[in-house]
Amino acid sequence: MKTVVTKSFKQTVKLGTEYAKTLKKGSVVMLKGELGAGKTAFTKGIALGLNIKEDILSPTYAYMNDYSGVLYHYDCYRLSCGEEAEALGLTDYFYGNGVCVIEWAENILDVIPKNALTVTIEKISENERKITL
Ligand SMILES: Nc1ncnc2c1ncn2[C@@H]1O[C@H](COP(=O)(O)OP(=O)(O)OP(=O)(O)O)[C@@H](O)[C@H]1O
Ligand SMILES: [Mg+2]
């Protein structure tokens, strides 16, 4: 586990790109942090690191965006339990070959694989983020 302080959105994206290189097929990553912490920014970096060319948009309304089966980007802010995620078919990808990156995984913790990784992003000022990974 290491802690890095980023001083801009770009630095957080870059850290995400470096982090992506440590991931394996089927890795599940829980991204923790308050609204606006930088979870989606970090995910943009992971996508770059996985050679995904598409722009990463927040999946808030879709719950999950599928980037060609390579990356599944979740935003579970509006889900209230694991059962709901299961009913929506969202948990089907947790044990597959793609990397799953999950914002607000806390809301569906009961269905998150036991071996999931955690990245925590804390806002320490307007532009600074303390990232533990
Ligand atoms: N060091 C930094 N790292 C990341 N984002 C930063 C940083 N400094 C400022 N920001 C700003 O913080 C915001 C982070 O937004 P982002 O959508 O990534 O947050 P989020 O954690 O995904 O929020 P939500 O829970 O609403 O989805 C952006 O507006 C970004 O420009
Ligand atoms: Mg987000």
Image: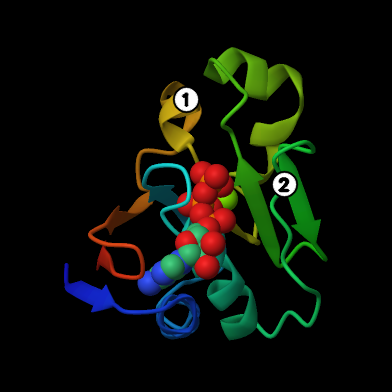
Residue at the spot 77% in from the left edge and 62% down from the top edge? 69
Mark toward the viewer: 2 or 1: 2
Residue at left offset 63%, top offset 82%: 48
The answer to whether residue 10 shows anywhere in this view is: yes
The earlier-in-sequence mark between 2 and 1 is: 2
Residue 101 seen anywhere in this rendered image of the structure: no
Q: Amino acid at mark 1?
A: Asn
Depth check, front residue: 40 or 23:
40
Residue 59 image label = 2
Q: What residue is shown with label 1?
A: 107
Pinpoint residue 43: horizontal percent, then vertical percent.
55, 65
Look at label 2 and name its amino acid. Answer: Pro
Q: Where is the C terminus found, in terms of image quarters?
A: bottom left
Q: What is the number of callouts on the image? A: 2
Work out whether 118 lies above or below 83: below
At x 60% / y 14%, what residue is drawn? 83
What element does badge 1 sit on?
helix
Left-right relation of 87 to 78: right
Q: Quadrant of the N terminus?
A: bottom left
